[in-house]
Image: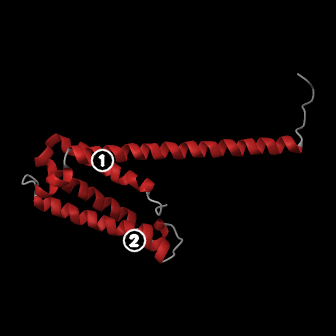
Amino acid sequence: MPAYRRVPTNEEKTTAAAEKQQRQQRQKTVETISTKIHALFWCILAGVTLVSTDFLVVIFESDKVNRLYFNLALVCIAINTVIGFYLCIYVPYIARIDLPWEVYCPRMIPALTIIGTLCGVLLLKALWPVWGFLTPLILTSLGMGAMFSLHFMPFCP
């Protein structure tokens, strides 16, 4: 081992910093592409499930669907949709509020969670007579597809 080390010059420092920044940018790009592929997988799976089960026709025309639970689930979906539009569109673009959601309206996320969970339980009870044990799989694939479809919406952060 030599008794001294070479001291890097300014050019070498800037080159190393540029390489590090380029590696970080490449890693961020790879993560973004991976996330989009993952979201696309769930959206395709939801689409295949929707078509193969003839979901929309069955839920609106089948006599096997428990209408009370289904209608309550539709109310929960409507409430979650209104809260989602409020948080994603009204607060940042119309009211122009730059505060994070948990600061400006801290009760919205727990409300979304409770109503979403209730909606899932109601949908399970409403659609169980139609598909039986496949109902949780069908609802999971459709729910994940709906959630991951937001990755392709340009206005959601």
What separation in Å lies between label 1 and label 2 (alpha carbons)?
27 Å
Camera-nearest residue between 117 and 46:
46
Instruction: Relative to 6, say whether 75 is above or below.
Output: below
Which residue is located at x 39 percent, y 71 percent?
86
The answer to whether 87 appears left or right of 139 in the picture is: right
For image coordinates 50% across by 42% down, the residue present is 34
| Residue farthest toward the left in the current orientation of the protein | 63
Residue at x-position 56% and y-position 42%: 30
Q: Nearer the viewer, mark 1 or mark 2?
A: 1
Label 1 amino acid?
A: Gly
Q: Are marks 1 and 2 in contact (CB under 8 Å)?
A: no
Which residue does the numbered mark 1 point to in the structure image? 47
Q: For the view shown, which residue lies furthest in the bottom direction? A: 95
- Residue 59, given in percent of the width and then of the height, sits at 16, 55
Q: Secondary structure at mark 2?
A: helix
Q: Residue furthest right?
A: 3
Amino acid marked by disc 2: Tyr
How packed mark 1 is, by other alpha carbons closer than 10 Å (few <14, some 14-19, many 20 or more), is: some
- Which residue in the protein does label 2 denote? 86
**Residue 128 on image: x %, y %:** 14, 48
| Quarter that holds the N terminus | top right
Tell which of 13 and 52 is nearer to you.
Answer: 52
How far from the left and from the top, in percent, is residue 40?
Answer: 41, 46
Figure disc tally: 2
Q: Secondary structure at mark 1?
A: helix
- For residue 152, what is the image quadrant? bottom left
In the rendering, at what x and y percent does residue 87 appear? 42, 68
Q: Is residue 149 visible?
A: yes
